[in-house]
């Protein structure tokens, strides 16, 4: 149970630290990775939903046994970013920097799956 606690707490804290700055980086992203973001509602929507999931990770960390049924959704949240990003990178449509972030999410998805297997059912 400690494994799940530490894994989900670390993932939640890491995610918050990685995502909150995105709210202030739209212009810089346009400069560093043109073209400019043409649909900011998708950008901010992605950041907002991802940020909400970081809170879910912190909730799971508080009581992994109780919140074990939510762990598969946490795994899907990670894989839903990993698979398309790796596909886009393989086709020259995603930069290495974004793909490195997806690699971290792949590691977290694996750790979440291990947490699911190690956490007893209620």
Image (tube, rainbow, N blue to C red):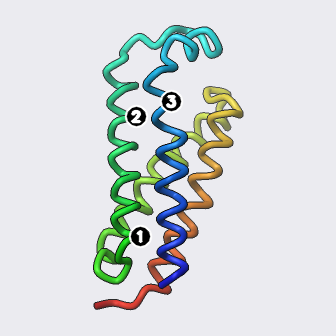
State which quadrant residue 60 falls in.
bottom left
What residue lies at 47% left-to-right and 21% top-to-bottom? Answer: 24
**Horizontal placement of 69 versus 33: left or right?**
left
Q: Residues within 10 Å of mark 2 (few under 14, many from 20)?
A: some
What residue lies at 41% left-to-right and 58% top-to-bottom? Answer: 76
Q: Residue beneath label 1, please?
A: 61
Q: Residue beneath label 3, please?
A: 21
x then y, percent, for residue 3: 55, 79
Inter-mark Cα distance, 3 to 1:
23 Å
x then y, percent, for residue 18: 54, 40
Please report whichever mark, 2 or 1, sits nearer to the chain's N-terminal start: 2
SS at badge 2: helix
Inter-mark Cα distance, 2 to 1:
21 Å
Mark 2 vs mark 3: give the one in front: 3
Check the image and report above or below for 47 versus 3: above
What residue lies at 38% left-to-right and 77% top-to-bottom? Answer: 64
- Are the residues at dot 2 and dot 3 in contact (C-beta closer than 8 Å)? no
- Are the residues at dot 2 and dot 1 in contact (C-beta closer than 8 Å)? no
Inter-mark Cα distance, 2 to 3:
10 Å
Q: Nearer the viewer, residue 107 or 48?
A: 48
x then y, percent, for residue 12: 46, 55
Query: In the rendered image, which quarter contains the C terminus?
Result: bottom left
**Horizontal placement of 121 versus 78: left or right?**
left
Check the image and report above or below for 106 versus 71: above
Q: Nearer the viewer, residue 8 or 90?
A: 8
Check the image and report above or below for 88 versus 62: above
Q: Nearer the viewer, residue 61 or 97?
A: 61
Checking the image for residue 47, the label placed there is 2
């Amino acid at each position: 149970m400690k494994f799940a606690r530490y894994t989900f707490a670390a993932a939640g804290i890491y995610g918050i630290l990685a995502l909150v700055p995105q709210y202030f980086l739209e212009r810089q992203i346009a400069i560093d990775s043109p073209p400019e973001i043409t649909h900011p509602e998708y950008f901010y929507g992605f950041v907002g939903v991802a940020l909400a999931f970081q809170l879910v990770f912190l909730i799971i960390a508080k009581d992994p046994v109780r919140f074990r049924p939510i762990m598969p959704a946490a795994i899907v949240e990670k894989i839903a970013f990993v698979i398309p990003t790796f596909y886009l990178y393989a086709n020259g449509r995603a930069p290495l920097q974004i793909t490195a972030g997806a690699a971290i999410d792949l590691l977290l998805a694996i750790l979440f799956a291990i947490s699911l297997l190690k956490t007893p059912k209620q």
